[in-house]
Amino acid sequence: MANQDATYDEVVAKLRHRFGNQEQQEKFRIELRTRRRRHGETLQELSQDIENLVALAFPDTTMDTRDILALEAFIEALGEPGLSYKIREKGTSTLQDAVIAAMKLEVLRNSRAHSRDQSRPRQVRMTQAESDERTKKTTAQKPNAMTSRSQSIEDKEAMRKKINQHE
């Protein structure tokens, strides 16, 4: 049976021991430092995961401090130096502002790439008819290996006959 006369500090100590201790906080801090955006992960998913890791890694800090830590971790986790630089350049002060700025920049980048692809002329290597015509020309210009070989054998035979006649 649990001790019902436990003090507040004892309850907090037991809860910390049960749900999170210094080693776990250090583990979450390492995860936070090494966290990078995964392929196909949305910016919202990344920011949510960063917020959770910050809360677990720094449970005793104020909300303002957590937001600053999450902002820095989010920018680093983007994994794209150009995008990170532009978000820093905008001077965002909260994680939410950074997520919105990153989303806008990502949409602009994707639309620019899409419009560049659309405006690029399509290059066709060659049609089937052109390919067939080119094949016919090269075949007509070059005799095949068997024809060349048989002609060289015939040439050698003719040469031998001429040599034998002169002897």
Image: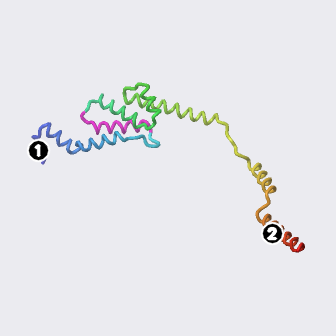
Q: Residues within 10 Å of mark 1 (few under 14, many from 20)?
A: few
In the rendered picture of this protein, how many numbered marks are placed on residues?
2
Where 84 falls versus 150 (above or below)? above
Q: Would residue 48 appear left or right of 137 to someone viewing this image?
A: left
Towards the viewer: 64 or 88: 88
Magenta stretch containing residue 52, yes or no? yes
Where 63 falls versus 11 (above or below)? above
Q: Earlier in the sequence, mark 2 or mark 1?
A: 1
Q: Which residue lies furthest to the right in this view?
A: 165
Where 36 falls versus 145 (above or below)? above
Towards the viewer: 120 or 136: 136
Q: Give the range drawn in magenta.
A: 42-60
Using the numbered discs, state the Cα–Cα distance from disc 2 to disc 1 in whole angstroms: 108 Å
Q: Where is residue 107 in the image (x, y as percent from the top left)?
A: 51, 32
Residue 35 figure quarter: top left
Instruction: Please name the residue shown 11% across and 40% down the image.
Output: 6
Magenta stretch containing residue 40, yes or no? no
Instruction: Please name the residue shown 70% across and 43% down the image.
Output: 124
Q: Where is residue 42 in the image (x, y as percent from the top left)?
A: 44, 38
Q: Could you tell me the amino acid type at mark 1?
A: Asn
Circle nearer the viewer, 2 or 1? 2
Query: Which disc, if any, is residue 3?
Result: 1
Q: Would residue 4 appear left or right of 118 to someone viewing this image?
A: left
What is the magenta segment's predominant secondary structure?
Answer: helix
Q: Residue furthest front?
A: 167
User: Which secondary structure, mark 2?
Assistant: helix
Residue 58 figure quarter: top left
Residue 14 figure quarter: top left
Q: Would residue 85 appear left or right of 122 to someone viewing this image?
A: left
Query: Which disc, if any, is residue 153?
Result: 2
